[in-house]
Image (cartoon, grey):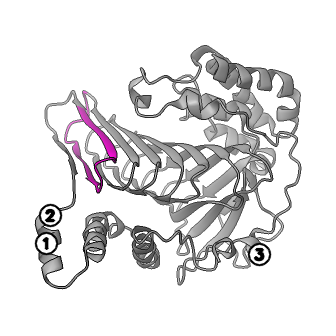
Amino acid sequence: MKSEKQYIDLFTDAHAMICEHSSPVMNHVREQAFKDFKQQGFPSRKIERYRYTDINALFEPNYGLNLNRLEIPVDPYAAFKCDVPNLSTSLYFVVNDAFYTKALPKVGLPDGVKVLSLREASMEMPDLVAKYYGQIAKTQEDALTALNAMLAQDGLFIYVSKGVQMDRAVQVINLLRSDVDLMVNRRVLIVMEEGAQAKFLFCDHTIDDHRFLATQVIEAYVGENASLDLYCMEETHERNTRISNVYVEQQANSRFNHNVLTLHNGITRNQLQLVFRGEGAECVCNGCVIADKQQHIDNNTFIDHAVPHCVSRELYKYVLDDQATGAFAGRVLVEKDAQKTNSEMRNQNLCTTKQARMYSQPELEIYADDVKCGHGSTVGQLNDEAMFYMQQRGISQKEAKLLLEFAFINEVVDNIQLAPLKDRLHYLVEKRFRGELNKCAGCRNCQ
């Protein structure tokens, strides 16, 4: 209970300060979250969804928290350039957990679209935010979601009103910045009304060479006939720990496209929980992981087919080098009345050394009898015959290894719907395989 106790004591001692610097809407959820966290404690590896990551060990160190909301000096536009060429995004920054307001994009958003601080939104539009905030990210069901809800003071709010179709993608750069080891708790709330369409790219980066522990909870509501593309890319450093829980609720005939890309990290756990609430909805969930050294990446997904005539597609691919550890646990639940469900889940993994470890656990739980469902998992090494064939034709062993790794991961990258981002990722993936810690063009911290 040592890990839990420090956060329980912290909340008890700093309760007034936490609430003062947040909003009534967030505070309303906060009290129940605290009760749920005290009751559950951190999940142990005996809990199925957390068997591959030692959560207690991640939260045991003593991190600082900016609960008094002291301003952290940083100009993200000067310190960090993360502009994907030709993508023409509307670019926003979140520094730790605070929406950066000192310089906003010059190109305005369409009427009916809002991108702003979650705290500010819940003060200006309390009824709208309260309708959605904390409704699908249930604190009684997950201790890390409860911890996030009890400590989070701000984050990001995105709202796309009925029928609005955004041509320009929105890019959000999450920057971790501190002069000491820091814990950050960030919330993101995305609301897509009926018939709305939008694409969002979230990029996680670190500015300073300190230890960071970042928890993030994303709630995304995809209304009837709405379409949401959500790309989450991590390029942090080896001293970063990232815990991200994504909750999605889809209504009838909606479409959700989710891509989680881990190009460089320390310890990462991504959890996706999606439920179909209306017939005819479709989701495509892809994951790409490249890891080496002692990096650890754990992706956990749960898709609930609660209604008939829905489609889910999952593809997660890992390339692990050195002593890296990867884990994928995917569960698809087809409930009793969810007839005509169409679901496919694939997890394919490449361990390029004998020391690399991969754990794969795809599951189907089916209670309907008229469905089309399948799943598969493979863990292998580089093809010796292909390596030999290329070396016989003058390609060096190092280059042959790179080509095979790139070809393996390419299927996920090719599923990216934003063409400029796809081209950029081809370049970044190649640089990553070559061992170059390239982040984004123009990043002054890498020069």
Q: Where is residue 262 shown, x and y percent of the image?
A: 46, 57
Disc 2 marks which residue? 384
Disc 1 marks which residue? 388
Taking the spot 54% from the left edge, 63% from the top edge, the residue there is 200
> Which portion, as a residue range, is magenta?
336-364
| Numbered label attached to residue 78 | 3
Nearest to viewer (mark 1 / mark 3): 1
**Distance Cα–Cα, label 3 vs label 2:** 47 Å
Q: Judge from the rendering whether residue 247 lies leftward or rightward of residue 80; answer left or right.
A: left
Q: Where is residue 97 shown, x and y percent of the image?
A: 72, 50
Q: Quadrant of the C terminus?
A: bottom right
SS class of the residue under badge 2?
A: helix
Instruction: Check if residue 347 falls in the magenta segment.
Output: yes
**Distance Cα–Cα, label 1 vs label 3:** 47 Å
Q: Which amino acid lies under the numbered mark 1 shown in the image of this protein?
A: Phe
Nearest to viewer (mark 3 / mark 2): 2
Q: Quadrant of residue 168?
A: bottom right
Q: Judge from the rendering whether residue 173 lies leftward or rightward of residue 322; answer left or right.
A: right
Q: Judge from the rendering whether residue 48 lies leftward or rightward of residue 127; answer left or right.
A: left
Circle 3 residues within 10 Å: few <14, some 14–19, many ≥20: few
Q: In this rendering, does residue 31 appear at all? A: no
